[in-house]
Image (tube, helix red, strand yellow):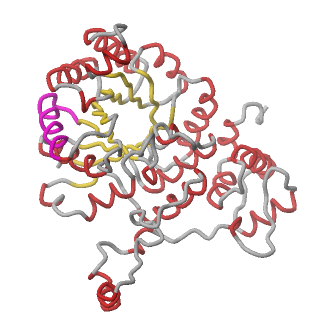
Amino acid sequence: MPQIHFLDVTNRDGVQTARTGLSKFGKTMVNFYLGRLGVAQSEIGFPFLFHEVPYVRAQVALAKAGAFVDLRLSGWCRGVAQDVEKALPLGLAHYNLSISTSDYMIANKFRGRLDRDAIIREMTAAVRTAKSGGARTVGVNAEDGSRTDDGFLTEFALAAKEAGADRVRYCDTIGGDTPDRIRERFAKLAAAVGMPVETHCHNDLGLAVANSVSGALGDLEAGQDAWINTCVNGVGERAGNADLLSTILAFRHGFGLAERGARIGDPIDLSWARRFALWASYALGQPLPYNQVGVGRNAFAHESGIHADGALKDHGNYELYEKATLGPFPDDWHARSGRVILTGEYGGKAGFRHVMEGLGIEPVDEELSFKLVQLCNAMTGRPLADDELRLIGAYPRELALLFPGVLD
């Protein structure tokens, strides 16, 4: 039975969003929440960049310690062997390697530096480098795939498969695809190459979720698993990427998936959905729209007479899914009104112990956890959320790798 998997790219595409950003500790928390939510894989960042190295080492250590449940961690590299060579020593088991494939970008981005033959040579060399270096899975990204003609897209994907790639990522880089078109292209490409085609949809036309669902259905029609790229709260460059929760809900509650003999292959636990979405809004400094799917303030609000009457009689009259399945709204310590003692960058031991005891947290290493509270608060520039404090208390030695020298 073909399965649907979610590969979240918040820590790569999401953090590239203009006028926003996440600290390395914030990116760590994204992986924490993705693991609790049951998502298959997180594209954690750029392991070939010098400033990502301590962060990647910390993520690998946290994953080994069980902090992210069964979440798989992958690195994004350009589709060139040199990037992969720099990344391999950090111990990631999964990679996505990206290179532009459209004639438009060959002409207007590469400007004569690369042609189609060179693109395939660079890409296949990068795939072989990753696989020979011990990578368990490699996805190859066709950047601007939606503007790449069928013939070259198939040639590119077949060359990637022969080199050892496990998936090809079809990137609707400028967000111009439409549901019928992308479904047809996915079905054709997945059937031609005999491996999953991964969705990566931008929201420039407001169709990122619809296109992701449609592309995945094309995979299923070809008898292949579907892998879908998402970002929490739909963040991402320009108008954003496919929203994680919306896409999950579309497959869980939209009409027709079971009839196709397919299922979600990830152990999704939506009871973490509200905590993740509202934490991300807080960490990114981006308020959730009132109508944000599932977690917005108005997602289960009714006012008009007909709707209110129907919802009072049976909320199923006007609601597709149960609000309780999305988990509780967070009520974090730092958000309390009135007199409150916080712990952070300039706090002392008394305040630290007061907060940790109040949250029922018993740090496995109190001294190191105290240092990390100060360091992580200094890194984020905002009061730490309850789940952040819990992670610090439970995994201080692994988190300390974010800060070279702390364990010396």
Q: State the residue in front, 232 or 176.
A: 176
**Side of 174 where 327 appears, left or right:** right
Residue 169 in the image: above or below residue 107: below
Residue 342: quarter of image = bottom right
**Side of 198 where 257 appears, left or right:** left
**Side of 272 where 339 appears, left or right:** right
Give the x, y percent position of residue 290: 46, 67
* Quarter placement of the C terminus: top right
Residue 185 on the magenta segment: yes
- The residue positioned 71% from the left and 65% from the top of the image is 334
Give the x, y percent position of residue 397: 69, 42
- The residue positioned 18% from the left and 58% from the top of the image is 257
Q: State the residue in front, 400 or 248.
A: 248
Residue 38 in the image: above or below residue 331: above
Residue 326: quarter of image = bottom left
Overall secondary structure of the magenta stretch? helix
Residue 289 in the image: above or below residue 172: below
Q: How many marks?
A: 0
Residue 354 in the image: above or below residue 236: below
- The residue positioned 42% from the left and 75% from the top of the image is 324
Give the x, y percent position of residue 36: 48, 56
Residue 20 on the magenta segment: no
Residue 19: quarter of image = top right
Give the x, y percent position of residue 116: 26, 12
Q: Which residues are magenta?
A: 180-196
Q: State the residue in front, 342 or 73.
A: 342
- The residue positioned 60% from the left and 28% from the top of the image is 53
